[in-house]
Image (cartoon, rainbow, N blue to C red):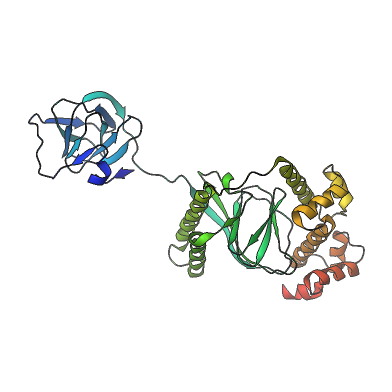
Amino acid sequence: MIRNLSQQNIRQFGTILAEKEPSRYANHHSLPLKDGKAELYQTVAQTWLNRECGLTILSVSTDNENFLDFYLDKPVWLHGGVYFTLTPFQGNSSVQLSAFSTPRHLETRLAGNFMVYPELRVESICTFFYQELEQGHLVSGESHSMAELTYVDQGSLHSVADGQDILLEQGDMALFAPYQWHMHYADTDVAPRIVTISFSVSGCDLTPLLNRKFPSGQKAADLLRRMLREQELMNQHSTDMILSLLQQLLITLLREAHTPAAKPQIPHFANNENEIIRKAQQFISAHVREKLSVPSVAQSINVSASYLTALFHKHLQISPGEYIRRIKLQESKQMIREGELNFTQIAEALQYSTVHHFSRQFKEKFGITPTEYAKSVR
């Protein structure tokens, strides 16, 4: 990135002179510079440089490794021992040089690229929802090709990924990587309001943001609010603004992730337990329309039913049997919305003993009958 050539910026390497202040030395040299080439020098003594013709980039360093780039638009004195390159910005150019001892010409390099490109780029946004969830909300887990961010605006929500249950409270957010299996559920007496965004991102490793929660902080919360406002307005360039604001939000989270308060290391045994739960959840989701029991799920992942039950209570505060029941009931809501099967067929598909058993559990869980729910979504 090309910087402004100012006294403050150049002080480590030299000093700026007044535009008409002459060199102290009479032996001025004109250095012709060719497009695409960068001439590398090292000053032997104090050296005076000034533009002559065309646009030139002055790059300076004290170690010949870390260079700062400046637009050479005014006279400058460089200290002795400073490495510098002179590069035409566009086309050919020339520079005036004067010194008691001529700088050493070290080599001719190919010109570098002075443009700045983003390291992190949000390529696209697939979904951007503000949702008011029902009490005890629970859906079977999913994985997809997009990254996903979840923010809790009101209430609380359990975020589960890789078998780890993280309680997101008001103002907290969590991130899931592409193809990372995850799910959400709310406590039975909590109806949370959340923001979810699924998106694709390039040039960035999201690993530091995974399997942890972030208190959003004032800056992050403000960025989310601005995104929601732009979504409501949806006028000219609103989509560009939303993409830009999400990019800023991710950068903010990445910076926070590298602070001393970064995610603590999870003990190895806890990782193993989380992996067992993750496998169980994925098995239940994949076989939700089959007859499921705690022993059959435990057998599928080679653990005992009692151990699986203990892990679910420890990490998810729910029994695996209750988890299976909730997943089946949430699946039934999806089937009702699709409208392809009647209630008897849905009960049979989900392996309920009778349609009355299904209806009774549906009413206990959601507070309305399947018939009432069907009327509300059609």
Residue at horizontal 92 percent and vertical 63 percent from the top: 353
Residue 220 relative to residue 136: left or right? left
Residue 178 relative to residue 134: left or right? left
Q: Nearer the viewer, residue 182 or 191?
A: 191
Q: Nearer the viewer, residue 363 or 287?
A: 363
Tell me if residue 29 comes above or below residue 188 in the rendering: above
Q: Position of residue 188 (x, y in %)?
A: 75, 67
Q: Position of residue 231 (x, y in %)?
A: 51, 66
Residue 90 relative to residue 26: left or right? right
Q: Which of the 4 image quarters holds residue 193? A: bottom right
Q: Position of residue 1 (x, y in %)?
A: 34, 43
Residue at horizontal 52 percent and vertical 62 percent from the top: 221
Q: Quadrant of the C terminus?
A: bottom right
Q: Nearer the viewer, residue 121 or 219?
A: 219
Residue at horizontal 59 percent and vertical 58 percent from the top: 173
Residue at the right extreme, as displayed: 353
Q: Position of residue 111 (x, y in %)?
A: 31, 33
Residue 331 seen by the camera: yes
Q: Which of the 4 image quarters holds residue 23? A: top left
Q: Which of the 4 image quarters holds residue 288? A: bottom right
